């Protein structure tokens, strides 16, 4: 038994109760781990939290579900002290508390594992764990012992001396969990922990969570994937439009019921019905290869910061010089076809997009668009030639955040009508067309003179989709087109892509959302370590099969056997 | 809608006002700390500015600063920091003076040749930094500072009598020889006050051109996009390398013009007496003017006033360096206050958009119309 929950309710007996959910009778008499009451948060631009009430029992996994943008993350930020509620009370272990910073929350035993990991790549696991918590157990042998203890107690299997950059996504997540346990957390908040994992890794994570629960810890699990929630949760609270709309018992609830609670109506589906694939190739890629530049090559165009001398010593160098980021990629997308690429992030998808856009220069390979070789053509010429681009990181590649919407409408299409004539901008026409996009693509904004930064993520994305579609692309690169977008906008973006496909557009779809990939694509390819390793028919493949191919476990033509029964209802 | 625009104006003005007020207060504090009367020198400077000859000096110096500051500002608009304006201005003034003295052409053509040589020299000198940045990744901050140092030595060497220099009889000064009268730019005679350089009006016209190029051309859009987000600009099709070189060339070309008002309007030769520090003051001017042609004009006027109205402070027993302290404080105050105002403005707009959306102030979209 570890000392940091000595003062805690005794853990559950190992024998499972008849319910099969490992519940503890003891919990009924002890105060709830967390009780939120009447939480209201007004927040500019996004859905506010409104009169939220949640009770989380000790020693349980409590799932908080809701659409993207329903207000789950805001709520958890309030619980973690990152934001202050305008109204309402928070009680931890029956005691009313107010948090003004995450430090306060940590002191009360609340820890958070963020969706985006907060680890320093060039440090070891041990160094990452002690960073900022040096006072707890020092930075040496004592800390290492503690880490081993925690890791063994919960079956995390963390190696303290491994470099974080050598770890896979699932391992990194375990380090994040260990980090909060190390700081004495008794209540863990996991923000969409499965978003970055393939199905097999999700199962392993759930084993870890059950382990934590059996040791008496409380887990708050945020998700919008219903199948997973039913598998692991003891209690479920559903949030819709910023308020709690109900609770559900995972033993009796079905994904369909949950989904309806979550959305308040019938679910949109990414499914494309009739096939519109033609046999006219629109984009053809042959033998595309890109080798990683040497470690010495710094990006020359950013304001050159002198190389950090310390980094030169500690940087862990990849032993294989010139790793292949893209390895002999060949693909063809026909008019009216959506080709989906599945893969764990960082397996070459970004590089593939950049090569197609002309933002990097591949070592070998030919790209042709509509029969024309565009391998050496500039980004601007490719865009003029009919490539539309919905970037994976809209803030970095798709928008000028501090510029007004109408200037963002010009971005990427400055040489095309209606934005300019003979080198001179036409602000009047651009503004008028921006208003059209705002209208047609349902961008919620008070006007076109506000900056892009003041819109919510979903509305920013709709503006980008509207802009790219306005130039009648022949070929659209859609990277995570609905990431971080609320359900209404998601359906609209899918509709826009489907409509364009019907009109003969070729689409390259890259997404981490397997349901989106399977539902929208006509053809599926799996990318692993810069290679297209497997092919699948979206009509028969299951997310699980796709998941194992994404880890490199399966190659070639994947044969689907049966439709997934409890696929995530999205 | 009008409301947001009014807000924009207030927020736009808040930065410079905050900077100037705080730097004024700090200067007064510095004067108090040194045991001097804090108000008297400022009163003296304002008195000075009442004389017509000082006014002409101020206007003439404004034109010089304005040109140099436009050069700095065009770099700033795409996140390039051309500290080398000083070197580009001096080298260009010298080379164009040499060429101007060496050739003899009919009136307007002679002036045109001198101006073009100045632009070309400034552009080439700045272009070195641009090429270093795009090919070797050398920061333009470092390379332009070094080019400044090289300029100092290069000019000193070129102006030696054994090279191109001319020493007027009975003088210690070194010059590059007199430009014939066909290469003089006519000014406006202000009687006792002296002459306002004719080139000052060219400077103002260039301010209009600057505005048009930045705000109304594809090139200007690409430039601004690169300044706001290099990654987004690249994804939008901007060739970053070409953009850096072009911006450096234009910046250097404008810097090269900064010497023209004096050269064409008064001195008609490059000499050791040419004003120094123009390029450095221009950086502050561009910052204070928020890289906007009108803002830069006011900032240039203010700095010309500080420079020229302070010259008689020494006689009254006050150190002239007060104005340098004030200029230095303005630099710091500008950077701090602009960032404060920017953050406040961003937050405020996000709030406003949230409020307006919550109040149903969104533009009617098709979805709603059909619903």
Image: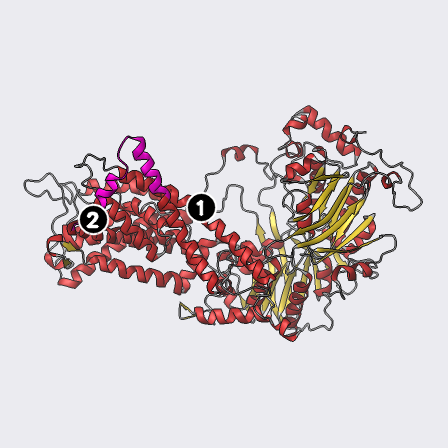
**Above or below A442: residue B297:** above
The majority secondary structure of the magenta stretch comes to helix
What secondary structure is found at the residue carrying circle 2?
loop
- Indicate the position of residue A527 as horizontal and vertical percent values: 68, 54
In the picture as drawn, the residue positioned furthest to the left comes out as B170
Residue under the image location 46 percent in, 39 percent down:
A306
Q: Quadrant of residue B325?
A: top left
Q: Quadrant of residue A543?
A: bottom right
Residue B49's label in the rendered image is: 2
Chain letter, disc 2 residue: B
Q: Is residue A6 magenta?
A: no
In front: A262, or A277?
A262
Query: In this view of the protein, can residue A365 be seen by the observer?
Result: no
Residue under numbered circle 1 = A303
Quadrant holding the C terminus of chain A:
bottom right
Q: Report the magenta residues as a range.
A: B22-51
Quadrant holding the N terminus of chain A:
top right
């Amino acid at each position: 038994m570890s000392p940091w929950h000595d003062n805690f309710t005794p853990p559950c007996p190992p024998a499972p109760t008849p319910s099969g959910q490992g519940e503890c009778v003891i919990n009924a008499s002890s105060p709830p781990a967390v009780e939120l009451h009447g939480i209201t948060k007004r927040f500019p631009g996004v859905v506010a939290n409104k009169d939220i009430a949640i009770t989380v029992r000790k020693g349980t996994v409590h799932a908080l579900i809701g659409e993207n943008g329903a207000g789950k993350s805001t709520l958890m930020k309030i619980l973690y002290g990152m934001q202050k509620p305008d109204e309402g009370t928070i009680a931890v272990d029956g005691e009313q508390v107010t948090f003004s910073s995450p430090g306060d929350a940590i002191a009360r035993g609340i820890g958070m594992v963020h969706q985006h990991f907060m680890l320093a790549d060039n440090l070891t696991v041990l160094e990452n764990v002690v960073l900022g918590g040096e006072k707890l157990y020092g930075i040496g042998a004592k800390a290492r012992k503690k880490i081993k203890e925690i890791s063994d107690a919960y079956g995390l299997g963390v190696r303290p001396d491994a470099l974080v950059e050598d770890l896979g996504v699932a391992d990194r997540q375990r380090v994040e969990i260990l980090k909060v346990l190390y700081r004495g957390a008794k209540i863990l908040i996991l923000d969409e922990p499965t978003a970055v994992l393939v199905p097999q890794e999700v199962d392993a994570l759930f084993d870890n969570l059950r382990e934590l629960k059996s040791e008496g810890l409380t887990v708050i699990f945020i998700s919008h994937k219903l199948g997973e929630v039913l598998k692991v949760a003891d209690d479920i609270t559903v949030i819709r439009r910023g308020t709690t709309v109900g609770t559900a018992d995972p033993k009796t609830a079905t994904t369909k019921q949950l989904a309806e609670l979550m959305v308040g109506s019938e679910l949109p589906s990414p499914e494309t019905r009739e096939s519109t694939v033609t046999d006219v190739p629109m984009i053809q890629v042959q033998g595309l290869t890109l080798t990683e530049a040497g470690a010495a090559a710094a990006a020359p165009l950013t304001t050159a910061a002198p190389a950090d001398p310390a980094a030169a010593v500690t940087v862990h160098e990849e032993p294989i010089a010139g790793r292949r980021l893209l390895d002999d990629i060949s693909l063809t997308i026909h008019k009216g076809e959506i080709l989906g690429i599945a893969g764990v992030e960082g397996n070459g998808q970004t590089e593939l997009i950049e090569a197609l856009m002309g933002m990097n220069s591949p070592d070998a390979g030919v790209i042709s668009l509509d029969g024309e070789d565009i391998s050496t053509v500039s980004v601007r010429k490719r865009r003029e030639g009919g490539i539309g681009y919905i970037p994976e990181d809209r803030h970095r590649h798709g928008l000028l955040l501090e510029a007004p919407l109408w200037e963002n409408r010009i971005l990427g299409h400055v040489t095309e009508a209606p934005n300019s004539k003979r080198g001179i901008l036409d602000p009047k026409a651009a503004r008028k067309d921006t208003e059209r996009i705002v209208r047609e693509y349902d961008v919620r904004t008070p006007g076109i003179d506000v900056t892009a930064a003041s819109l919510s993520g979903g509305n920013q994305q709709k503006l980008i989709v509207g802009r790219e579609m306005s130039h009648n692309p022949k070929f659209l690169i859609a990277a995570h087109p609905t990431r971080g977008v609320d359900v209404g906008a998601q359906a609209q973006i899918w509709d826009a892509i489907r409509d364009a496909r019907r009109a003969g557009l070729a689409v390259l779809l890259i997404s981490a959302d397997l349901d989106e990939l399977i539902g929208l694509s006509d053809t599926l390819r799996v990318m692993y370590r810069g290679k297209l390793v497997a092919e699948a028919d979206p009509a028969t493949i299951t997310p699980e099969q796709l998941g194992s191919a994404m880890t490199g476990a399966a190659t070639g033509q994947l044969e689907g056997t049966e439709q997934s029964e409890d696929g995530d209802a999205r | 809608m009008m409301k947001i625009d009014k807000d924009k104006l207030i927020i736009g003005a808040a930065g410079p006002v905050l900077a100037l007020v705080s730097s004024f207060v700090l200067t007064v504090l510095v004067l108090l700390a040194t045991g001097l009367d804090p108000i008297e020198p400022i009163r003296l400077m304002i008195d000075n500015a009442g004389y017509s000859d000082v006014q002409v000096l101020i206007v003439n110096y404004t034109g010089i600063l304005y040109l140099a500051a436009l050069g700095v500002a065009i770099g700033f608009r795409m996140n390039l920091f051309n500290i080398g304006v000083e070197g580009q201005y001096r080298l260009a003034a010298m080379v164009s003076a040499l060429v101007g003295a060496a050739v003899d052409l009919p009136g307007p053509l002679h002036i045109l040749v001198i101006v073009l040589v100045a632009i070309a020299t400034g552009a080439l000198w700045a272009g070195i930094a641009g090429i270093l940045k795009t090919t070797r990744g050398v920061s333009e901050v470092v390379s332009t500072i070094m080019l400044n140092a090289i300029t100092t030595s290069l000019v000193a060497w070129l102006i030696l009598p054994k090279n191109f220099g001319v020493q007027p009889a009975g003088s210690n000064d070194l010059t590059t020889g007199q430009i014939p009268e066909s290469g003089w730019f006519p000014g406006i005679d202000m009687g006792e006050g002296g002459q306002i350089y004719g080139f000052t009006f060219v400077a103002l016209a260039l301010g209009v051109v600057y505005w048009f190029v930045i705000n109304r051309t594809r090139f200007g859009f690409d430039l601004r996009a690169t300044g706001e987000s290099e990654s987004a600009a690249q994804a939008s099709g901007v060739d970053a390398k070409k953009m850096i070189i072009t911006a450096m060339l234009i910046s250097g070309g404008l810097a090269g013009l900064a010497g023209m008002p004096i050269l064409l309007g008064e001195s008609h030769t490059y000499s050791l007496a040419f004003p120094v520090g123009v390029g450095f003051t221009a950086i502050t001017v561009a910052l204070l003017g928020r890289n906007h042609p009108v803002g830069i004009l006011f900032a240039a006027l203010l700095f010309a006033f500080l420079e020229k109205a302070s010259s008689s402070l020494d006689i009254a027993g006050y150190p002239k360096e007060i104005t340098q302290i004030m200029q230095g404080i303005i630099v710091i105050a500008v950077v701090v206050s602009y960032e404060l105002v920017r953050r406040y403005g961003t937050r405020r707009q996000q709030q406003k958009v949230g409020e307006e959306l919550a109040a149903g102030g969104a533009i009617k979209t098709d979805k709603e119309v059909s619903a």
